[in-house]
Image: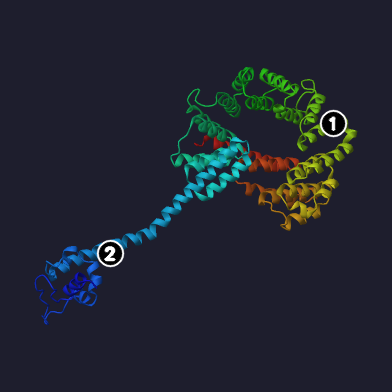
Amino acid sequence: MSSLKKDRADYWAGRAPGYGPEVPTTTDTAKPQGWFIRLRNRYPSIVYLFTPRIWNDPDHFLPTDVEQEIYFRRRKIKIVLVLLLLVAGAIFLPDRIRSTMEVYRARERAKEALTLLEKGEAAAAWDKAQVAKTIRPREPVVLRALALSAGKAGRPEEAVEAWRTYASVKGEFTPQDRLERAEALAATGRYSAARTILKEVPAGAADGPGESLLSARLNLGLGDKDEAARLLGEMLARPQLPFGVRLEAIRVALESLPPEAPARTAAQTALARFVAEPLEAHAPAVEYAAKRLALGELSPEAISPETVRARLNALPLNLERRLLAFDLEIQAQPGRLADCVQDAQVVYNRQPTRESLALLANWLLKHREWARVLTLLPPVRAKESTALALARLNALSGSGQLREAKLEITSQRYQLDPLTQQVLLAQIVGAAGDKAAADSRWNSAINLAGDDRAKLRQVESAALAAGSEVTAKRAASLASASEAALMLAQP
């Protein structure tokens, strides 16, 4: 040890160093020594490192007891404050970090959902937005993505609820957002509320054609068909109208306007023009024309079925398009049904996916090919999705195997919601001739539907198909009452 370090050690030990003034030692036995004096005497070098610099100066005497007490009281306060800060950080900082990470993850999922929407993948965007909602249910970015994806995915009820929550968290609405919200409200039957939202959109700020189309739909919902026909006629007369908006205007005009309306005639002319043009981009128009012709809701004089069938066959391979072409062929030549069924199965075998299997099964059901559906869908395969399960159950009912269908429903083999189960059981027991049991099942289905307009309409259509007019009228009445309440409700 150097002489300086030895002198300082002697100094702290209470001994006089080799230089400087004599340091008196404490000899007062009446007053016990403080803990600092004892610590200093036992570990002088360590105490030297953690004491004020002036105390280490050999030209100064040791501090008095009062000075020591003041200094170490402040030191204790500082240590306690530091410990408190450390404890608070350990308690609250992880939550803050977790919250920040959750916000980041939720926003990233919402951005991915919006990107999928731009690509036209509405179902995938809805699933991604649902994931984001589970992370941060009230994040504005997440709610906006959820509302937009729900509207595009055909879920207007969920879209209305998401927009309402978005407004409650003070989300900022763009003009296009307001237009999307109004469309969701109109799709759920809340036409008055939709019109109120539409009035908040500045003129020319949003998509002009989309706004005009929505106005036409609102007028149709409110019963003003003349104004709707005028708006649709003006839209169809525009030369630069986007294809998607023009096709939607055609659909609304053909399905909602009377045959004598000029706008309906203009819609048929525009659809025929799309069918005649050999462009792959116009494939949705060709498919829509084929569906209308197959249902007998479009005049063959307006659009030739042979032209539509040739255009469908010229488009890239797609099972849905080929099935539409087969429908037109069967409509023209009913004796070709067996050949078309075999050709449809060949087309399916080229792209055997679960979605295409459900599409083929429903097409076969439409043509009453019960045995082929049951062959395609054994119970193990039908469990893969709700659509396949419904197709198998409908095939069993159609072929007269009512007992087997009832057993498969009640065995909980398939993941069916309670409303669907009650509707299917009502149809089966009604077909078996048990009217009392069928009425009981229909009542249970209506109770499960509650005030949900869409579910009540589902019960109505199922009851009409089963021949239960009383249940259909009751469901229609409740659905109309629900629609009236929605029209009066505010968004």
- Eyeballing the image, is 352 above or below 238? below
The image position of residue 344, as x and y in percent, is 83, 39
Left or right: 476 in relation to 194: right
Quadrant of the rendering where the N terminus is positioned: bottom left
Q: Secondary structure at mark 2?
A: helix
On screen, residue 232 versus residue 17, left or right, reads: right
Circle 1 residue: 329
Cα distance between the residues tagged 1 and 2:
88 Å
Q: For the residues carrying marks 1 and 2, which lies nearer the camera in this image?
A: 2
Of 122 and 482, the residue lying toward us:
122
| Residue 337 seen in the figure | yes
Residue count near mark 2 (Cα–Cα under 10 Å), binned few <14, some 14–19, many ≥20? few
Q: Amino acid at mark 1?
A: Glu
In the image, 157: left or right of 337? left
The circle on residue 80 is 2
Please identify the quarter of the rendering in which residue 123 is found: top right
Q: To which quarter of the image does residue 26 belong?
A: bottom left
- Picture coordinates of residue 60, whole percent (x, y): 12, 67
Residue sitting at the far bottom: 29
Return the x and y of residue 240 as percentages of the image width and height. Answer: 61, 19
- Residue 137 visible at all: no
Residue sitting farthest toward the front: 2
* Rendered residue at 63%/46% (across/down): 449
User: On screen, 472 above or below 200?
Assistant: below
**Left or right relative to 276: residue 226:** left
* Other-residue count near label 1 (Cα within 10 Å), few / some / many at <14 / 14–19 / ≥20: some
391 up-or-down from 88: above or below: above
Q: Nearer the viewer, residue 319 or 291?
A: 319
